[in-house]
Image (tube, rainbow, N blue to C red):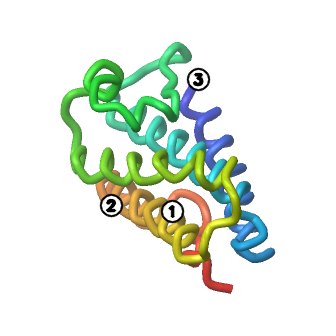
Amino acid sequence: MKIEEHEKAYKEHLDSINRAIEEGIETSQRNVGYNVSQGSIELFAIYMHKLKLIQGSGDQFDHRVFKSKNLIAKKVPPDFASKNRILELMGIIEEERNALCYGARKPKTRIEKVINAFNELRRIINENLNKSQMLGGATNGGKK
């Protein structure tokens, strides 16, 4: 996908996350799980494009990559700013994705953990890109 498509998809996921927060994360955990996961993938792809580590329309990331060290080694560029922390946050988000999307209701604190990991990922990537404002609107960490 081209960077513009990633940016459009990222904004859609961010809007869905913010809507889920407004509606109450306890009743929207599946939306949070899915949109935080996919939003983080789109944000990561934007970051890789802006660092010129991927190009064009053929490079896409599957969310399952971030749960496997072997797949990370094969699919993720070898070096970029804050790589270890970014991959750690992506791993946290992906580990929680299935539990939130397909499992029984989880405690609010567990849903907030995923939102907080997403917000930290956004902060790190935006700082690394030296942007004066964050990509998209800010989420409030699950607080109403």
Q: Which amino acid lies under the numbered mark 2 shown in the image of this protein?
A: Glu
| Residue that carries the numbered disc 2 in the rendered image | 127
| Residue that carries the numbered disc 3 in the rendered image | 1
Front in this rendered view, residue 143 or 7: 143
Front in this rendered view, residue 136 or 44: 44
Location of the C terminus by quadrant is: bottom right
State which tag comes first along the sequence, 1 or 2: 1
Q: Which amino acid lies under the numbered mark 1 shown in the image of this protein?
A: Val
Cα gap from disc 1 to disc 3, whole angstroms: 26 Å
Seen at 71% across and 55% down, the residue is 30
User: SS for tag 2?
Assistant: helix
- Does 89 sit above or below residue 105? above
Q: Label 1: how many residues lie within 10 Å, few (<14), some (14-19) or many (20+)? A: many
Q: Which amino acid lies under the numbered mark 3 shown in the image of this protein?
A: Met
State which tag comes first along the sequence, 3 or 2: 3
Location of the N terminus by quadrant is: top right
Seen at 78% across and 70% down, the residue is 27
Lateral position of residue 6 relative to residue 134, left or right: right
Please tell me the numbered disc located at residue 114. Answer: 1
User: SS for tag 3?
Assistant: loop
Percent across and percent down for residue 32 are: 66, 59
